[in-house]
Image (spheres, rainbow, N blue to C red):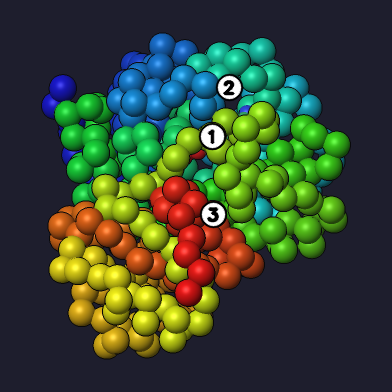
Amino acid sequence: MKTLLLNKNEIDIAADIIKKGGIVAMPTETVYGLAADALNGEAVAKIFKAKGRPMDNPLIVHISDIKQIDMLVAEFSDKAKKLAEKFWPGPLTIVLPKSDIIPDEVSAGLSTVAIRFPSHPIAHELIAKSSPIAAPSANLSGSPSPTTVRHVLADMDGRIDAIIDGGDCEVGVESTVITLTEDVPTLLRPGGVTLEQLRAEIGEVKVHPAVLKSLGKGMKASSPGMKYKHYSPKAEVILLRGSEQGFCEYIKENSDDKTAVLCYEEEKDSFKNYIVLGKRDDEVAHAHRLFTCLREADEDGYTRIYAHCPRAEGIGLAVYNRILRAAAFNVIEV
Ligand code: AMP
Ligand code: MG
């Protein structure tokens, strides 16, 4: 298949492809998404094939108008309305009971559907000109999510109908996912909208144990995506937890030419091979750069990456959740 590269003035072409049952990578404010008509099960199935995604991992449905929600969900509760009013359009996904028009391919057979209203103007226009769009991240299943067109091309060229170039994605990590279908609202995936912001809006919000830990045997995944090893570059990622001195000493003793350090701007002079994640206290920059840095390590031929264990608060929680999975939960105390 030849993959068309489109620009922001060619969204009509992309909308036509979607309406005819094709699949298109689109920029959003979080990461690039791989879009299909959410109401067309056959089109949605192509997403799973292109990504090599397990069929039991459901997709998020993206809307461009709050009015679209009535046909997609069985119930739009008061808490859901509060969250929507505060955080949409933006990087928040809300899991709700689904309506009958959601194809099984989207919900992976669950009785719920995940809904997001993105703020990116290109995503907005594409949805408005076609239909509600089902989209996961536009990467091969398991690899770091794409935050630039270059990343999408690396994974998807020849596998999808088109890519719309929208430059770099602003947030850099996927949306926050909260479910309102359990007794207490539960955070399933941290992202650009923080846990602290959610609690300020609707009160109690639980954190699903899988956000910070590996799912133990017999533990239920409320969000099927939690089951999989995720976001991983080819290089092995190892997290080091402890003081900066411990970090530097461990790396000095355990590195070779193929080892890179994912480090802060302020400490880069301590290392020979480094990739800068951002300034030490700039967690927004860490989220923005994380996936780019992981892909960069592969492009530069490194086979091992040492990284700091992030602070599990604010947007740092999203960085921690992603890098912990990229590292397959390999954390060393230093
Ligand atoms: P991605 O594929 O990277 O866009 O991630 C989508 C995430 O949303 C995955 O972790 C899914 O498991 C999760 N998700 C989608 N739909 C649902 C749902 N109905 N219930 C719980 N989690 C969901
Ligand atoms: Mg993904």
Where, by quadrant of the figure, is residue 34 drawn? top left
**Residue 171 seen in the figure:** no
Residue under pointer 2:
107
**Residue 271 seen in the figure:** yes
Mark 1 residue's CB less than 8 Å from ligand 1: no
Taking the spot 56% from the left edge, 38% from the top edge, the residue there is 226
**What kind of residue is marked 3?**
Asn
Density class for disc 3 (Cα within 10 Å; few <14, some 14-19, many ≥20) is many
Q: Position of residue 277 (x, y in %)?
A: 37, 71
Residue under pointer 1:
227
* Residues under numbered marks 1 and 3 in contact, where contact means CB atoms less than 8 Å apart: no
Q: Quadrant of the N terminus?
A: top left
Kindly identify which numbered label has been placed on residue 321. 3
**What kind of residue is marked 2?**
Ser
Mark 3 residue's CB less than 8 Å from ligand 1: no
Mark 2 residue's CB less than 8 Å from ligand 1: yes
Indicate whether 244 appears above or below 136: below
Q: CA distance from mark 2 to mark 1?
A: 16 Å
Taking the spot 18% from the left edge, 35% from the top edge, the residue there is 157
**What kind of residue is marked 1?**
Lys
